Structure formats: C-alpha cells, structure tokens
Image (cartoon, rainbow, N blue to C red):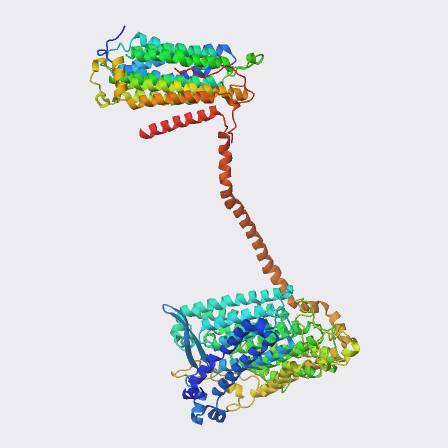
Amino acid sequence: MMMTHATSSFSDPVLVRYLALGAVLFAIGLVGFMARRNMIMIFLSTEIMFQGVAINLIAFSRYYHNADGQSFVIFLLTVAAAEASLALGLVVMLFRQRQTLNVDAWYDMQG
Amino acid sequence: MFQLIHQLTLDQQAEIFAGLIPLFPLAAMVIIAVFGGKVLKGRAHVPAIIGIACSFFLALLLLLIFDVGQFNGIKAALFHITTAQANQIGALNPEFLQMKFTTWFSAGGFNIPFGVYLDPLSVLFVSFVTGISLLIFIYSSGYMEGDYGYFRFFAYLSMFVTAMTILVLANNFLLVYLGWEGVGLASYLLVGYYYPKRSARDAATKAFIVNRIGDTCFAIAIFMIYLTFHSLNFANVFYGPLQSASFRAAHSSMMFWIPLLLMFGAFAKSAQFPLHVWLPDAMEGPTPVSALIHAATMVTAGVYLIARCMPIFMHDLPVLHLVGIIGTFTAFMAATIAMCQYDLKRIWAYSTVSQLGYMFMGLGVAAGSAAVFHVFTHAFFKALLFLSSGSVMHAMGGELDIRKMSGLRKRMPITTICLLVGALSLAGFPGWAGFFSKDEILSAAMNSAWSGGPWLAAVGLLTALITAYYTFRAFFRVFMGDLVLPQTAGLHEPSAFALPADVGHDDHNGQNAHDAGQHGHDTHHGHDQVRNTSFDGPISMWGPLVILAIGATLVGWLGVFGGHGDQGWIQSFLARVPMNAGIHYVPTPPGGLFLPVAAVNRLSPAMGMTIGGILAIVGILIALYFHLINRHAAEVVKSALRPLVTFLENKWYIDEIYHYGIVMPLWYFGRALYGVDHVVDGIVVNFFGYFPQLVGWVLKPTQSGRLRYYAIGMVSGLALVILGVLYLLR
Amino acid sequence: MDYPLIIATACGAIALYLMMPRGQGWLVKLGALIGVLALASGLSYLTHWASVHYPAQPAAGPGIFFYAFALITLASAVGVVCHPKPLYSALYFVLMTLAIAGLFVLLMAEFIAVVLIIIYAGAILVTYVFVIMLASPSGVAAAAVDYDRISADPLIAVLVSFLLLGTVLETLFTHTPHGFIAASASGVTAHAAHWGGLAALGKNLYSRYTLPLELAGVLMTISLVGAVVIARKNAPHTHMLGLGEMPAE
C-alpha cells in the first residue's frame, strides 16, 4: 500500500500520532537508561532514544513536505554510529579495569 | 613689658593675671612630661615648683587687687595708681570681672569661650590652691625623692594644679566641667601612682567611678542649665532671667532639678554620703597626693560649685536644706568612723569627709562666707596633718598603724609640734584656725532663719566633740607615751615598683641626718644607730610643715580682724559674693539678688564660741585619759562596746552594702550579658559560618558518583522545569 | 488537563514498572496486560481527541500499518529495556529497528528506512553484540554475573520518565489544535512532488547541508581515531581479547 508521493494527506491528527509514538519511545529509552546497571544496556537505551527522535524528524519531514528532516536523520545516524563506537571502546576499556560492566562500580567522583 | 602691663587698667591686668595662672603649671607639665624621663629625672620638681610659684605670685597679686581696701597703700604703690583708683575694684561695681580669651568651640548658637570669671570667691580659692600646692610640691621633692617615676608624679601634680585653677577661674559651666574632669583624672592617676599594687589600682578605679556618678549628674545639670537659660556663662545664668519671679515660676521643675543634680555632682567630688566611699581608699596614693588633692583642694571643688551656684540654690530652698542635712549627717558619720580607725591616714581621710560635711552644713544654711572660710582654714590644717603623717610614715618605713607606734615625739620633735598645731586647729581649740571657722558655721546654723538650723547645729556640736576626741586619740597614741617603734622604723619603705635595689634609690639621705652624704643602704645597722637619729626628714619636708603650722595658727585670726566693721578680713572680702543670706545685696540694676532675711538670734556669737571651746577641751581631755594616762582603760571600753566598735571599724558597713547591693548584681548582670553575647555570637555568627557547611552536608548525598543517579537527577530536573514553565505560561 | 491521557500514561508507567526485571515472573505478565490496557486506552483517547478537534478529517486515520508497526516498535522497545539478558535486548533492538524502518517507509522516507537497517541493525548492533560477547567475565563467574537480574531503581526511573512523557503528551494534545507552524514558513522545496525521494534528499544534503555533511565526515574520522586510541591495550594486566579497530560503518 505504497502511497504516492504527493497526494496522501498527512493531517494533524496523524502527525500527532507519530509524535506521540516518538515521545513514548523516547520515554521508554529514558527508563532503560536510568534503570539498568549494565553499561552496554545503558548505551543501547540511548539508541532507543535516538530512534524516537528520528521518528519525530521524519514525521515532520513528511508533514512539511521537506527533505530537511530526512537530512537531519542522516546526520543523526552518523553521530549515533560515531558515538556507539566510541562508547563501546570506553566500555571495553572500563571493563578491562574492573572486570565488571556494572556501572555502579564506578563511583570515584563521590562527594 | 611691665610698662605694657601698667598701661592697662587694673581690671584688665587682673584678668590677664588670671588667664596666666593655669598656664604656668600647664607649661611645667609639658616640660616635665617631655623631658622628665631622660633629662630631668631627679630634678623634675624644678619646673613644677617654678611654675606653681609663678602662679602663686599672680594669685597673690589678684588677692591684692580684689582686696576690700585694707591694703590700698600697697596696691597703689605696686600698680602705680592712685589710692582712689586702688579702691575702685574694692567697691566692686560690677560684682565680678569677666574676660574671654578665646573661644573653645562654637556650633551654631552654642558658644563656649575660654574665659575667666573673677570675683572674690574665685580669687580666694585660686590663691590658697596655688599656695598650698606650692608648699606641697616642695614637700614632695623631699618625700618622693628617689622614687621610681619621680617625674611622672610631678607631671601629674602639675596637671592637677592646671585643672584646679581652670575649675575655679572658669567663666562658664562647661569650662568648670573641664577642670572638674581634669582633677578627677589627676586624682585617678595619682591614687594609682603605685600601680603595681592591686589595692592602689582598685582604689584609683573606685575613686574615678564614684566621681563619675557625680560627673554624670553635673553634666545633666549643665544640659538643663543650657535648656533653661540658653547660655552657660555665669554672667548670663546668675544675673539674667534668674532674677525674675515669673521666669522662675515658668521653669519651676528645672529650678528644682538643676540644684539637685549640682548637689549630687558636688557630693561625689567632695565625698559626702552616700558617695564618700572613695576618699578613704584614695589614701593608697602617696601622702602628698592625699594632702593636696584629697584634703585641701580637689575635694573642695564641690563646695566651690555650690557656693558659686548659690543664686540658683537660693531659689530652691528645699534642696539647699537637703545639702545641709546630708552634710551634717556625713560630718557625724565620718567622725564616728574616724574614732575607730587605726590607720593614721585613714583617720585624717574620714576627718576630711567630716569637715567637708561642716562646709556643706554652712552652705545649707546659706552662710557661704562661713563655709568658704572653713575651706580656707581646713586647707591649711588638713594639709599640715597629712604631711606630718607623711613624715611619720616616711620615718617608720611605711608603717601607719597607730597601734604599732608610740612616743615618737622623742625622735621627731619638729613633726610632733607641727602635727600638734594641726590637731589643735582641727579640734577647734580656742585660738587656732579651726576654732573660728567651725564656730562661724555653727553660729550661722544656730541662728538661721530655717527652723532646721538649730538641729544641724546640735549635731555639729556633738560632732565637734567627737572630732576633738579622735584627733587627739591619734596624737596621744602616736607621739606621746613611751617610745615604741615598729619593726620597719628607720628603714626604707619597700618600693611598690619592686625594682632592683640600686635603681631609683639614689641619694636617699632622709633617714640619717648625720649620714647626709652617703647612699642610703646603710640603715640596717641595728637599733642603737636608729635610736640616735632624728626622723624628721630633710628641710624640704619639715620646712613646708613649719610654714603650714604657722599658717594654721594665724589664718583663723583673718576671720576675726581686718575687715570692715567688726568683720574679719575674710568676711569682708567675701561679702560681695552672692552666697550669703541675710545680705541686702544691690547689684548694678536695682533690686536685690536676695531679699534680706532677718537672722534669728538664738545664740549670741560669744556664747557659741564658748560652748565650742569647751567641747573641744572636753574632747581633748577624754582622749588624754584614754590614750595617754590609762591606755588600758581604752581596751576595756572597747571590749565592752564590742558591737558598736566593730560597726564603726567597718565604716558603718557602707562599702559592704555597696559591694553586695550594687557591685555584685552588676557583675552578675555583666556575666549574664556575656553569656547572652556568647550565645548570640555562637548561634548567629557561627550559624553564618556553619550554614554553608550545612548546605554542603545536605547536598553531598546527591553527589553519589554514580552515573544513574546523575541521569535521574538531570531528567527529573528537566521534567520539573518543563512542568513549571508550562504551568506558568498557562 | 486531559484526564484520560493522564490515566493512560499512568497505566503505561505502571505497566513498564511491573515489567522491569524482577524476581517474580507473574508480575511481568501482569505488567504486560496492563501495558496492553494502557495502549488501548491511549488509542481510544486519541481517536476521541481526533474526532473532537478535527471533525472534518476522515475518520480513517493513518491506517492499519501504522498501528501494527507502532505496536511492534513499542513492544520490542519494552523488551530491550526489560529483558535481563543483554543479548536478548540487542535482538529486541534489531526487531525494533525493523519496525521503525517500516514506519519510515510509511512516512515516505524509504531511503532512510534502508539506511537505518543497514547502519543500525547491520553495523551498530553487530558491534554491540560483539562487545556483549567479549566484555563478559569468562569462566565460572560468567553464570553468576547477571547485572540486571533485578533492575535498579525502577520506581524512580519510571516515575521521572513518565512525568516527562506526561508533560510532553499533555502539551502535544492540548496545543496541537492551535496548529503547527505553517508549512510555508519552513520552505517547501520546488519539487514538491518528489520531495522525499533519494534524489531530493541528495540534492538537499549537498546544497543546503554541505557544511554539516563535511563536518559529519570529519566527525567520523575523529571517532575512528578516537576509538582506536581508546581501545588500545595499555593496562599491564589486560588480556589480549583480539579487539582491534572498531569496524567503521
């Protein structure tokens, strides 16, 4: 059921549904970020948040008949990839230090 | 320069002399203060004596100028004027001379000059102040010789004389207050001269604080005077609106409070009940200080103040009568205390308080001339008594307890005779000075128009009896009888400054008259050497004593002969000062200052003198019996009257009452306030110091170092901010 | 304030909370039930809201595919967050990515959809899986280590997130009837007919967003170098785990 490019109507209520979805996804990712101890899972939750933002951007791109949203998502993916690589490198390094992935093991900055 | 002076008129010359009088001691003080430590050292008395001699000379000139006409010839010759001109000031019209030298300060309409106010009262005061001071300065140069801080002593003494002369010569109340405070300060410094001694420091502080109470009352009185009269000059206050009855009625409450507060000020300075407690303690100072300040001059400042302000007091008779009552009571109280004291100087201190009471009695019955006459004679014989006691103390190595010495006449003949003269004068033995002056006060009280006068006179007569008794108790105990010397006789008094023995004790040759040239550490040679020497001291000490003795003998007769009519010279001299009731006084504007008040004739003067003389002799005889002939009987009586004696020995327990009633509560109050302050400091101030710590302590758990909690914090903050913004925007 | 929305959000919060890793298994199932309930109520609220505020619009809405893909997305996202084991979470993430790609296709961003799959599911997730495998303690301790068997502070996390979510949704649903910024203000491209295709995207990237593009490239280079530097073995006790350079995209 492919829509043709120009003729489908993308009205406000529909947009709102997409935006709501993006918001909920973002919230779920936030929960995961705050409630997991495994460092890798924390980063994975940030990826979920990225996804939510991407949905928002693409929805707006569709609403405004603009390629700007999509371009931004390209950049978003770029940054997400870069960030993932660096983050995982750090996780590996931290794991080597303490032999654990538990993020609560690192509290040297206490007080 | 003398030509310049002669070109001025006589009154201008008088004013200039008066203006110079305080300046000589002031200059002396500055010189001694600056050069005393290094340059002058043992010669610090020289500038002081020169300064005061100059002041005394000028005071004598003033006395001559203001003379009532007895010495016109001398005046004319000295001042190159005619006899008629010499008589001019004698008639004294106007009744005072006033001159302003410069302005002290002025603010808006408030203007205080440095000026002199010359009338017979101030001239008489300044002359005997400078005269007695001169003699005491000379005495001190012998007495204080070798003492550590010698120059400090003379600097303070010079400052005292400066302040005292300013006090009596001032032409407005604020300048009087300056002198008042100045003498108070000098008293503090000199009483605390032996500052290493705890008792001396405490006595000095006590003197100053009790004086302060009076000073506060005096200051408030000055404020009130300004509010009422809009001026502080004597001329404006005494000779201005005060004359009109409507003005007095309009300011009736002021007219009550001003004399009352002035009375309190005078009582503090002149050591009357209840503010007398400082004077006996002030005996901690060196003996010349006691003689000069606390006998002859400073304590008479109160009498001077009330005498000067008599025009105000005369319009508020209840307060004036209160002055008389308190004065009489004090006289009686102090005399009873003196009966049971054993420290020689303290006996004379209480005697001073008692005699000052007499002076206030005289003022209280509006017999100002009698009171001032008593001031004059009292200065002589009290200074004589103190200085003689100083010689005794000096000879006995600092010992003053009369129970420990006896029969000193054999060792100190000159001192014995001088003290005897003083004692006769104090006791009122007929012929000596105290007899005439005391009797005049008692007669005025007896014949006063006030019905309370005779009561005062009766108490005064009783006190006279007691006075004679305690005076000769001291004399007979110390100088008569068998020779008993205390342990420290002939030795140096231990220096309060506790310096190494060879510092400050140079050239002390007072002890051994025949060892005059040696340094004074060879006095421990045993009793036979001590026994053979005379303790009278150097001439610098017994010289002034002799002069004072002569004065104490003769000045009484000044109150008998030499004046107009059958008055003495003094009474005529002081007649023009508005401090006597019963004088129909006509100043330049017509209408008298006081209405003539007929005196009631209850007792003739001759009768009064007779009774006074008899009482004096009776007192002496009682003392003779108990303290010379049968000393054991004194012990018997003492033990029989044990409670009374204890009460009197302990000075009527007034000091204890003050201590427990005023000092201790204040001390506890101070501690309480200290505690409050501590708490307030602890709580408030420390709270401000502790608060950041508290905040940190509260916030520290948020810094857990754990990533998740930081994330939670960030997100919750974000949520709350967004909520807040949204709901605010609504 | 729309109470149905708040109730739906709250139900969703409770659901998520219950589904977090915990000891008792039956609570998870209960949570799932409540979650469905929440979604259903949310959906009904949405429909109601749309009919109230936009009566003129066709009632059909976005169609069945949207709902299907949305459901899969949410379910797999919940799975990512709530599964104790990291590997399963990664796999759920892949599922989520696929669903989102479907959504993108619905939104006429086919290129992005494919790119998403390639990059996320193909590269990033593979990396994650590698790291999950390699960064786990070896030997006997492996089984004992299960960091998220019981989740950490689920209550606060859920509470705060859903507070934020509630606020955002509330604003969204209250303000949307006032309309978004007018379409003309954001600059409609000339080729409106083909605004979303690959050609249009490429043109947009290279004409309007040239600088960000170049910077993105620089960013990638930097992250490459950085990753190499970070992952170098410099601790003396490190075992050589065979981790070399991170594969770039």
How many numbered marks appear? 0
* Residue B512, image quadrant: bottom right
Q: Considering only vertical position in the picture, is B102 above or below B196?
A: below
Q: Which of C180 and B200 is in front in this view?
A: C180
Most foreground residue, B273 or C29 = C29
- Near-viewer residue (B186 or A66): A66
Q: Which residue lies furthest to the top in this view?
A: A1
Q: Position of residue B385 (x, y in %)?
A: 64, 79
- The answer to whether residue B10 is above or below residue A29 is below
What residue is shown at x 50% (from left), y 72% (from top)?
A: B179
- Residue name at image x 28 percent, y 21 percent: C176
Question: Could you tell me if residue B173 is visible in this image?
Answer: yes
Compared across the picture, whether C109 is left or right of B365 comes to: left
Measured as percent of width and height from the top left, residue A90 is found at 47, 21
Report if residue B369 is visible in the image. Answer: no
Q: Quadrant of residue B602?
A: bottom right
Q: Which of B413 and B718 is in front in this view?
A: B718
Residue depicted at x 57% and y 12%: C139
Quadrant the C terminus of chain C occupies: top left
In the picture as drawn, the residue positioned furthest to the left comes out as C190
> In the rendered image of this protein, does residue B656 appear above or below residue B719?
below
Which percent across, then down, holds residue B560?
A: 56, 88
